[in-house]
Amino acid sequence: MNEILNALRQAGTFYLATVEDNMPKVRPHGFAMEYRGKLCFSTGNQKPTFRQLMSNPNVEICAMFGQTSWLRLHGKARRITDEQSREAALAEMPALKSNYGDPDKYMEIFCLEDASADIYSFGPTGIETRTVPC
């Protein structure tokens, strides 16, 4: 978990893919945290992302970190929004408050379940791959 979270933080921006009408939808994200042993992220409940996650929880996250490494993280997003998860997110990244205006009304927290990550890097013999459970 720490390795994945560190890679996402190093990347700064990562890309979250959801599904709508059987088509992938990808958008940039910049917030991830560990909460109760799970990798979590946020979105607004007024956004298409929220509706897509509620309709089909299958997601993939992709991020490039460093000069030669990237990861693909896949799992099922489960909504865990409550007062404690929101407080944890705001403590981790206070700027989220300005993103959502009224976090208690608009901010939703999702964690990844059944998740694993494939980490890739360019090595001396080509692309090296390893899988890390989350």
Image (spheres, rainbow, N blue to C red):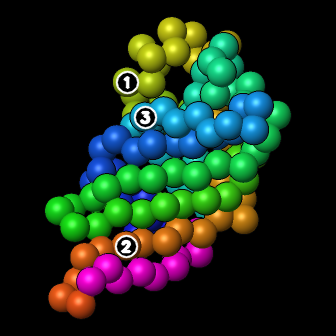
Give above or below for 7 relative to 82: below
| Label 2: how many Cα within 10 Å (few below 14, some 14–19, many 20+) | some
| Label 1: how many Cα within 10 Å (few below 14, some 14–19, many 20+) | few
In the displayed orientation, state which residue is furthest to the right. Answer: 55
Residue that label 2 marks:
120
SS at circle 2:
strand
Residue that label 1 marks:
95
SS at circle 3:
strand
- Magenta segment: does it hold 70? no
Q: Amino acid at mark 1?
A: Ala
Across and down, in percent, residue 91 comes to 45, 36
Indicate which disc residue 18 carries.
none
Q: Residue at x 64, y 49 (%)?
A: 59
Which of discs 2 and 1 lies nearer the camera? The answer is: 2
Q: Amino acid at mark 3?
A: Pro
Q: Main secondary structure of the magenta part?
A: strand
Q: Quadrant of residue 37?
A: bottom right
Tell me which label, 2 or 3, sits earlier in the chain.
3
Which of discs 1 and 3 lies nearer the camera? The answer is: 3
Give above or below for 73 relative to 17: below
Give above or below for 133 relative to 72: below
Residue that label 3 marks:
28
4 left or right, relative to 50: left
Q: Which residues are magenta?
A: 126-134
- Quote the CA–CA distance across marks 2 and 1: 31 Å
Task: Tell me how many marks there are.
Answer: 3
